Image (spheres, rainbow, N blue to C red):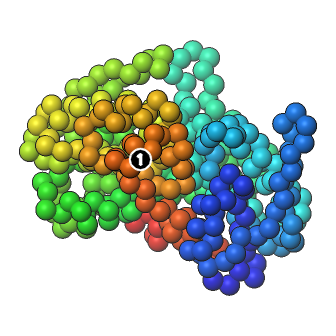
């Protein structure tokens, strides 16, 4: 790709993933500086001219052992602002994991709607476009932002993985909760296209109150079928483990799982190790740093999402449609 007017940055916490995206895109990462000051203050600035350029910044806003999601959000916002001040023609935040997208509505009186507040922050700093991957609620994401947005979907990556390995099984695609039924349907359709046959679907009832998850009734027939659980994110692993047990109890001989975001907490190691799941497939923009290495070795498969992100950036730079070329 001709990078004459394209500049691709990746902040330090997402540097490894950004390098993989740059390699797929056929460009080098642009140079920048990140400096720390007293009491947690910091600054980030580009070290090369971005005047008149189409600028993309890759940064995944998950918390880790070094920086919280809030720390990363502030650093990204300040850098986007610095790029606008440096006369970039267009600034796009490429955020594979966008923090706070699960707080997109009021579930209790006087609840904050944080997704909308996050959108206001990006807009206030002058961001031209925000791109993310597999948000929890697509309609809420799109309605929260007034600047341009793009949404990347990972169903083609997972469909290719499972079609190449489970083509000889009798399959059923299962959502671990009612809210994910539409997402699971998109994955099922992508898998059907690759297998050339129709697949049944099912879902597990789930209720959450005060961080307590309950409900394990499975709706749909999974008996004598390999169940593929589809979710957007795995954190503590309890929802996935509960759904896997429900599938096994209903007669599924084996269970696989896939989620775009492996935002694992340390508590997930015990839950996932005990869960009757043969393999859990996630993308690589969030390293599984919090998981016990034994869980990573025995249960986790990490697919590269760098190609998907690189192709999306290429589409945007060429003013082509992501829906037609990426989310097909």
| Residue nearer the viewer, 78 or 197 | 78
Can residue 130 be seen in the rendering of this structure? no
| Residue nearer the viewer, 219 or 3 | 3
Horizontally, residue 79 falls left or right of residue 200, namely: right
Percent position (x, y) of residue 40? 84, 36
* Quarter location, residue 206: top left
Label 1 residue SS: helix
Q: Residues within 10 Å of mark 1 (few under 14, many from 20)?
A: some
With respect to residue 30, does 102 lie above or below? above
Total marks in image:
1
Split into 4 quadrants, where in the image is the N terminus? bottom right
With respect to residue 176, does 59 lie above or below? below
* Quarter location, residue 83: bottom right
Name the residue rendered at 34%, 47% in the picture: 299
Q: Give the residue pinned by disc 1.
A: 296
Name the residue rendered at 73%, 47% in the picture: 122
Name the residue rendered at 87%, 66% in the picture: 47
Percent position (x, y) of residue 65? 64, 39
Percent position (x, y) of residue 280? 35, 48
| Residue nearer the viewer, 235 or 213 | 235
């Amino acid at each position: 790709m001709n990078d004459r007017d394209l500049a691709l940055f990746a902040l330090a916490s997402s540097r490894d993933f950004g390098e993989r995206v740059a390699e797929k895109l056929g460009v080098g990462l642009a140079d920048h500086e990140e400096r720390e000051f007293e009491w947690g203050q910091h600054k980030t600035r580009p070290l090369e001219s971005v005047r008149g350029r189409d600028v993309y910044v890759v940064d995944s806003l998950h918390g880790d052992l070094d920086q919280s999601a809030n720390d990363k959000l502030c650093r990204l916002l300040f850098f986007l602002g610095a790029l606008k001040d440096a006369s970039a023609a267009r600034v796009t935040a490429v955020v594979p994991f966008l923090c706070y997208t699960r707080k997109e509505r009021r579930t209790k009186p006087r609840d904050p709607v944080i997704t909308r507040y996050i959108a206001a922050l990006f807009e206030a700093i002058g961001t031209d476009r925000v791109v993310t991957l597999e948000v929890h609620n697509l309609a809420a994401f799109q309605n929260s932002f007034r600047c341009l947005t793009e949404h990347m979907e990972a169903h083609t990556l997972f469909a290719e993985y499972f079609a190449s390995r489970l083509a000889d099984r009798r399959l059923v695609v299962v959502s671990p909760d009612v809210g994910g039924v539409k997402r699971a349907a998109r994955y099922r359709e992508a898998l059907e296209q690759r297998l050339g046959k129709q697949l049944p679907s099912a879902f597990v009832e789930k209720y959450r109150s005060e961080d307590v998850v309950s409900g394990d009734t499975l709706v749909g027939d999974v008996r004598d079928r390999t169940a593929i659980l589809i979710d957007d994110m795995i954190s503590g692993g309890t929802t996935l483990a509960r759904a896997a047990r429900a599938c096994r109890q209903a007669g599924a001989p084996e269970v696989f799982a896939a989620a775009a975001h492996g935002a694992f907490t340390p508590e997930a190691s015990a839950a996932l190790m005990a869960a009757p799941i043969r393999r859990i497939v996630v993308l690589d923009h969030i390293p599984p740093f919090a998981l016990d290495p034994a869980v990573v070795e025995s249960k986790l498969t990490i697919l590269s999402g760098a190609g998907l992100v690189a192709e999306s950036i290429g589409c945007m730079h060429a003013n082509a449609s992501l829906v037609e070329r990426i989310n097909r």
